[in-house]
Image (cartoon, grey):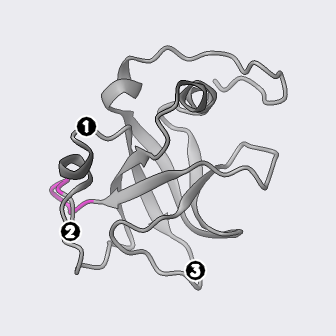
Amino acid sequence: MSSSTEKTRRAPDFRVAYKRLPARQRLFQHMRSNVHWAVDDDQTRQWSIWPEFESAEREPIPESDEPLECGTATMWVLFDQPEYRRDLRQWLRVGQEGFFMAGAERIAHFAILELLGCEADAQPIAPADGLRPPLS
């Protein structure tokens, strides 16, 4: 399978450092896990953001390779609707922590290392509904 950059013809949205957690679900390239932010009080809220695991040289690993126990991954926001991106941007900060999820199971912990692509230029905004605290 080709890389996400080749498939989508765009840059990834951000890069994370991750560490695998003890879980039933294993990590694999192009898995369709969701993301839950560690500071989000709503334990059911998940975001459709998929990882593409990288080698130590920050290149996408082949489909047949197992991701490292600790490593980096580029992250790809699945939905490109303006409202979805607007709501997501309140969570996107360097250092923000979250989890790769398989249903309700946390399978890896991560922290955002850098914002990339269109997210690198986006300005942070406060939540419109006031339900979630602004992130610092």
Up the image or down, 100 lies above or below 126; here it is below
Q: Please give the residue where the numbered disc 1 appears in the rendered image.
A: 10
Q: Main secondary structure of the magenta part?
A: loop
Q: Please give the residue where the numbered disc 3 appears in the rendered image.
A: 22
| Label 1 residue SS | loop
* Residues rendered magenta in the picture: 54-59
Asked if the residue at tag 1 contacts the one at tag 3, i.e. Cβ–Cβ closer than 8 Å, the answer is no
Query: Residue 85: x, y in percent?
Result: 54, 29
Mark 2 residue crowding within 10 angstroms, few (<14) / some (14–19) / many (20+): few
Distance from label 2 to label 3 (Cα)?
27 Å
Residue under the image location 59 percent in, 81 percent down: 23
Up the image or down, 34 lies above or below 112; here it is below
Amino acid at dot 2 = Met
Q: How many marks?
A: 3
Amino acid at dot 1 = Arg
Residue under the image location 53 percent in, 24 percent down: 82
Query: Residue 91: x, y in percent?
Result: 60, 33
Q: Quadrant of residue 109?
A: bottom right
Q: Which mark is residue 1?
A: 2
Residue under the image location 59 percent in, 50 percent down: 98
Mark 2 or mark 3: whose residue is earlier in sequence:
2
